[in-house]
Image (cartoon, grey):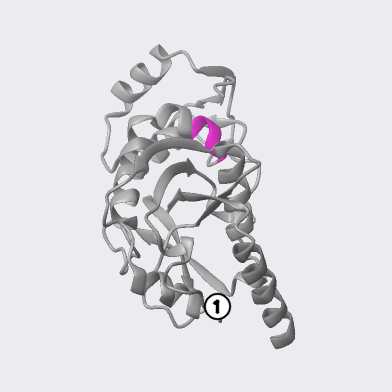
Amino acid sequence: MINDEISDNMRLHGVLTKEKYVKHLSVDCTIFSVQDARLKVLLLNWQDVEYWSLPGGFVKEDEDLDEAARRILYERTYLDNIFLEQFHTFGKVDRTSLKLSKDFLKARNLTFPDDHWLFERFISAGYCSLVDYTQISVFPRYNNESGKWFDLDKLPKLAFDHKEIVKKGSEYIRKNIDTQIAASNLLPEKFTMNELQSVYEAVLGENFRRNNFQRKILAMNFLERLEKLYDGSANKAPYLYRFRDVR
């Protein structure tokens, strides 16, 4: 195991030294999910580093930005084939930190001179997605990272400007909730209006009157009404629905 980790670190050092990446450009992914009726965000932590961070990485010279975001997310989380959208560009002059960057590299047994491109100014493209948290059960071993879902109002110490990225990412998810929920796989293929309402309430953090919610959703015409759900109870059987293709 130790030899494997050393080999992985040597491989990463070699890749970064060859400078195969676009300088000054990175990608950060805000991945949200619903757990216990609350919206949560996925954060990663390297052993021996105090700060948590978003899944992120660098863009290769021969790949499109969207392609880089998908690759980076898979390398950090094993998440694949999800609905991933670019939502904002982060470019404040002081958004990164030399010391913190070195701490992250030190956790991987990597060192570079102070004038290396890794420590220069970076502009980051923010991507976001709303996913079913059960899609993530393990993390790539060579990253030596742990991952955890956090409530948005109970975030740990975050690296760089990642707190701002989480904030803007959550705002984007809520603003585009209809498309995000339809593409998130948070619901089964067929679901009731009550199940859909529960997800909306968790993401938006507010409650809705059942009749008002149903009227608003049906007026948007992105649901297909199916058969009724008969479960043998005395209650009136609700209709089942499924999403039309919104991607």
Q: Nearer the viewer, residue 90 or 32?
A: 90
Q: Tell me if residue 183 is in the magenta stretch.
A: yes
| View extreme (front): residue | 115
As drawn, 221 above or below 104 = above
Task: Look at the image and tell me in which quarter the C terminus lies.
Answer: top right
Q: Nearer the viewer, residue 54 or 41?
A: 54
Chain part drawn in magenta = 181-185
**Residue 26 visible in the shown view:** no
| Left or right of 8 in this view: 98 | left
Residue at 58% x, 75% y is 144
Amino acid type at mark 1: Leu
Task: Say if residue 95 shows up in the picture.
Answer: yes
Q: Residues within 10 Å of mark 1 (few under 14, many from 20)?
A: some
Rendered view: 136 above or below 129: below
Percent across and percent down for residue 22 are 54, 48
SS category of the residue bearing label 1: loop
Residue at 35% across, 65% down: 159
Picture coordinates of residue 14 (x, y %)? 66, 68
Q: Is residue 150 above or below residue 241?
A: below
Q: Main secondary structure of the magenta part?
A: helix
| The N terminus: image quadrant | bottom right
Mark 1, residue position = 110
Image-quadrant location for residue 5: bottom right
User: Number of numbered discs present?
Assistant: 1
Residue 166 horizontal/vertical position (percent): 34, 51
108 lies left or right of 169: right
Tell which of 215 and 52 is nearer to you.
52
Left or right placement of residue 93 versus residue 224 in this view: left
Front residue of 87 and 242: 87
The residue under the point 38% across, 61% down is 150
Q: Residue 163: x and y, percent?
A: 30, 56
